[in-house]
Image: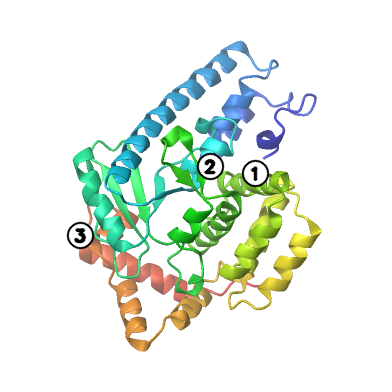
Amino acid sequence: ARWLVRGWDPGRDDALDEAALDRLLDLAWSEGVRVQACARLAAVETITVQRRQDYQAWVRQQAAAALGVQGRLRAVLDALQQARIPVLVLKGAALAHWLYPAPYLRESSDVDLLLADRDDALRAARVLAPLGYALAYPPGRFTHELSCRHRDGGLELDLHWALSDWPLLDRLPGLDTLRSSARPVPALGPAAHGLDAAHALLHACVHRASNLAAGLGDRLKWLQDLHLLAAELDRTDAWPRFVEVCRQARACGLAAEALQASAIVFNTAIPAAVAQALAAGRRDEPLDATRLHDWRYLQRLNFAALPDWGTRLAWIGERLLPPAGHLRALYGEDLGYPTLLWRRLRRAGARLGAKAPER
């Protein structure tokens, strides 16, 4: 984490031998920040010339791959524009081009796009089919995204129509609101736009909550997004706007917990007035954001947030018997539906039987 924000520390890091550097780079890979780590190490004169050349070569390969993804994404966005389907670029695919020093430094495994609704997402999938993209599996009733994979495996698109699929977070802004303050991303085409800094930070906080609920934890890649977005709000005096969008979305608790996690790792500067405002806002929210690891708690809240018993029963049914494509994406492409369902039920049983995390 220190390397990501300050770089090599002479006199402190010089003692790292080659085995230690390899272990750190393995860790950086699992945390989604290996490109940044290698780019910084390539400039350290106390590391052997051969090592630095290897780091530089690998970073160049990743930069070239990122340019390939950028070209493909431009073609996708051009096709959607020609079809008059409004869209925003989400998360790393957009942040890479304005929040980081160079786009290839923000690693991404897929590209997330936001559309107006399910119908537009399905229409977008049809528009992109001639470019080689196909639906991985049909979306369920309560999902908020569908996955489109290119036939050559070169790019996977996640087409979203909401920033979260939690019924509890039903006040998050939709596409129209987000487009009204969206920022251009010229590198992805003349019509390409992403979220403004305040909404991007809100989305990063919501995304972190989903990751914690899924057991994925806090990866450095995602915490660094939070850290850099907070610095951008400092630079542009946009903290009041961020607090306001959190209040409107009833996500002050999620924001406070996410910023605290970033501060622990990256020493992120959070203005006292912002911390106080988020603390006040979270008192009126139904979600206790300190319990994101408690699966049973989150299920109860999301169940209660559904509008009626018919919807609640359908929601339970989709979780007990999800589409086969969804299960294959989670547990393996070559498994039959009974085996997939058994794994799903075993996982649910383990969660139900697990002791709730201490608060």
- Expressed as whole percent of the image width and height from the top left, the position of residue 306 reads 42, 80
Give the CA separation, mark 2 to mark 3: 38 Å
> Is 331 rendered above or below residue 81?
below
Give the CA separation, mark 2 to mark 1: 10 Å
Q: Residues within 10 Å of mark 2 (few under 14, many from 20)?
A: many
Q: Inspect the image, locate mark 2, and give the three-letter code of the amino acid beneath it.
A: Leu
**Circle 3: element type:** loop
Q: Inspect the image, locate mark 3, and give the three-letter code of the amino acid beneath it.
A: Gly
- From this viewpoint, which residue is outermost toward the bottom? 309
Which circle's residue, 2 or 3, is located before the other in the chain?
2
Camera-nearest label, 2 or 3 = 2
Q: Inspect the image, locate mark 1, and give the three-letter code of the amino acid beneath it.
A: Leu
Camera-nearest label, 3 or 1 = 1
Residue that carries the numbered disc 3 in the rendered image: 336
For this rendering, which residue is in front, 326 or 157?
A: 157
User: CB of mark 2 within 8 Å of CB of mark 1?
Assistant: yes
Q: Residue at x 49, y 38 (%)?
A: 107
Look at the image and tell me whether residue 339 can be seen.
yes
Which circle's residue, 2 or 1, is located before the other in the chain?
2
- Expressed as whole percent of the image width and height from the top left, the position of residue 178 reads 49, 57
- Expressed as whole percent of the image width and height from the top left, the position of residue 83 reads 27, 47
For this rendering, which residue is in front, 297 or 164?
A: 164
Give the CA separation, mark 3 to mark 1: 44 Å
Which image quarter: residue 286?
Answer: bottom right
Residue that carries the numbered disc 2 in the rendered image: 95
Image quarter where the N terminus lies is top right
Look at the image and tell me whether residue 26 can be seen.
no
For this rendering, which residue is in front, 250 or 22?
A: 250
| Residue 196 shown left or right of residue 259 in the figure | left
Image quarter where the C terminus lies is bottom right
> Is 24 rendered above or below residue 177?
above
Residue that carries the numbered disc 1 in the rendered image: 228
